[in-house]
Each structure stands twice: as C-alpha cells, then as structure tokens.
C-alpha cells in the first residue's frame, strides 16, 4: 500500500509539473477545435490613460502618482492586499520589466520581484551587465491576486491605466514582458507566449520584447536558454540605441 501511495504521489507531482510547463507555453486554454478554425477574439486592453478628471492622471512624477493611487480600492484585489506594489527602480529607465502581479513576498514588502523569481531576475540582469537600480520593474496589477491566481481581465482593466501613466512618465526605450499574461494583455493578443516571443513589437513608442517569467524558469530549466537568448538580444539592441 505504501508503494502504491508513493507511486500515486509521484504521478500527481509529474502531472502538475507537466501542466505548469504547458501553461507557461500555451496558457490555460485547451484547444479541441478542428484545424483551421480561428481562435477566440483577443482580450482588449483599455486604450485610455484613465478618467482625466481624476487627479492622478495629472501626476508629474512616479512618486506623486504612487501617492495618489496607493490606496486604490477600485477592484476586488484592493481590500485583500497587505501592501500596494507600485514599482521600483530608475524613474528615467531606458528598460522597463513588466510582470503580471505581486506574489506573497511582494505583498508583504510592497516591492515587486523580491521572492525567488525576483532573485533570479536580479541574476538575469547581472548576466547582461545591468543592475536592478538601472531599470524599472512593475506589474500589470499592483495588488496580489489571492493564492497567486492569475489576474482577472476586470482587475487588469482597472489597473492598466496606472501602468500606462507609469510608462508615460518613464518614457522607456524598451519594455520586456515577463510571461504570457503580461504579454497577451499589453499586446491585446491570445497568441501563445512562443508565438509572441518570436516577434518584436512596439508599445507606447518602446521596443517590446516578450520572454519567460522568472517563475517559469524555476519550474522548468529548459526555459533558461531561450530566456538567455532574449536577454542577449535586449542587451544588443540597448547598446545599439546608446551608440546611435
């Protein structure tokens, strides 16, 4: 009986690892339709900077913006958070990294990417001769989704104007979407991470690159090589922009 339980536990663990890998590659959808059928319509991210009557839309710095929105309760995530996770880094950064949402460590500290995924992101930055203080790091949503679930479209729609305002103030040359959720939402696409990663994009005047979320690399080391290729491309483009 003990061997049977151990085999079952091992099978469940392997299945969970496989499903996580599939989610990182293809998202949550399971496609059963016949070949040639068009995919569902893309999620449409909001295209405005927010209601111009709201004071935060006129903020002239990141600190001012943070002070005006840090008590936001516009969606269901607000009442459940411990801390509002605005963003961190150089307010005039050439490169902005965007994830999907805060986790438990981020919710506790109020700073994005400080857990295991954040530590790996720091190593990735160091590998291309960048420091955390040189870039800017933030998320689509600024409050932790319960149990680290994916942000819901209504939550992202509510929070996206804040992100747009951050990007308007920073004026980055490069945006790096970390993971499928951030990439699909900003690009208003239902394409897989692999498909989005294969192309370069432009967003709010910046060159946008799609790569894997550091958390995906912690679950599956096979994602490390393509991520490294993406980061080398970023470094090359960044150096070329500085030399121009």
Image: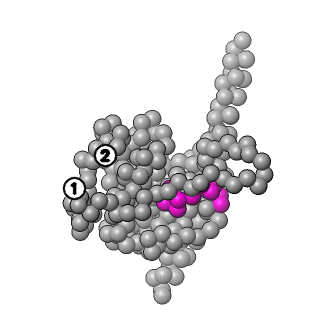
- Residue, x 42% and y 40% (percent of image)? 145
- Residue, x 66% and y 24% (percent of image)? 9
In the displayed structure, 43 sits above or below 7; it is below
User: Along the polypeptide, which appears first: circle 1 or circle 2?
Assistant: 1
Q: State the image coordinates of residue 173 (x, y, percent, origin top left).
A: 44, 74
Residue with the mark numbered 2: 74
Q: Which is in the foreground here, disc 1 or disc 2?
A: 2
> Based on the displayed image, in which of its 4 quarters is residue 79 positioned?
top left
Residue that sits furthest to the top in the current view: 1
Q: State the image coordinates of residue 103 (x, y, percent, origin top left).
A: 42, 43
- How many badges with numbers are in the image? 2
- Marks 1/2: CA–CA distance: 16 Å
Q: Which residues are magenta?
A: 185-195
Q: Secondary structure at mark 1?
A: helix
Lateral position of residue 62 relative to residue 194, left or right = left
Q: State the image coordinates of residue 230 (x, y, percent, origin top left).
A: 59, 65
Would you say residue 187 is visible in this rendering?
A: yes
In the displayed structure, 173 sits above or below 27; it is below
Q: Quadrant of the N terminus?
A: top right
Residue with the mark numbered 1: 67
Q: State the image coordinates of residue 35 (x, y, percent, origin top left).
A: 78, 52
- Label annotation for residue 169: none
- The front one of 78 and 37 is 37
Residue 187 lies in the magenta-colored region: yes
- Residue, x 66% and y 45% (percent of image)? 22
In the displayed structure, 199 sits above or below 10; it is below
Dot 1 and dot 2 residues touching (CB under 8 Å):
no
- The front one of 206 and 185 is 185
10 Å neighbourhood of mark 2: few (<14), some, or many (≥20)? few
Residue that sits furthest to the right in the current view: 35
> Based on the displayed image, in which of its 4 quarters is residue 66 positioned?
bottom left
């Amino acid at each position: 009986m003990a061997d049977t339980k151990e085999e079952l536990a091992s099978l469940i663990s392997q299945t969970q690892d496989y499903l996580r890998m599939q989610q990182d590659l293809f998202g949550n959808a399971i496609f059963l339709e016949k070949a040639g059928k068009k995919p569902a319509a893309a999620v449409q991210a909001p295209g405005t900077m927010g209601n111009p009557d709201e004071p935060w839309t006129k903020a002239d710095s990141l600190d001012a913006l943070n002070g005006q929105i840090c008590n936001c309760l516009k969606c269901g995530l607000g009442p459940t958070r411990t801390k509002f996770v605005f963003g961190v880094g150089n307010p005039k950064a050439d490169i902005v990294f965007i994830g999907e949402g805060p986790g438990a460590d981020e919710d506790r500290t109020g700073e994005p990417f400080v857990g295991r995924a954040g530590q790996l992101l720091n190593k990735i930055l160091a590998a291309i001769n960048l420091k955390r203080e040189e870039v800017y790091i933030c998320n689509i949503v600024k409050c932790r989704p319960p149990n680290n679930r994916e942000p819901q479209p209504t939550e992202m729609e509510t929070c996206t104007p804040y992100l747009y305002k951050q990007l308007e103030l920073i004026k980055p040359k490069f945006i790096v979407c970390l993971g499928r959720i951030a990439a699909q939402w900003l690009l208003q696409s239902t394409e897989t991470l692999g498909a989005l990663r294969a192309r370069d994009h432009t967003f709010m005047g910046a060159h946008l690159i799609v790569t894997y979320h550091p958390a995906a690399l912690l679950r599956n080391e096979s994602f490390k090589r393509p991520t490294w290729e993406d980061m080398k491309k970023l470094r090359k483009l960044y150096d070329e922009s500085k030399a121009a």
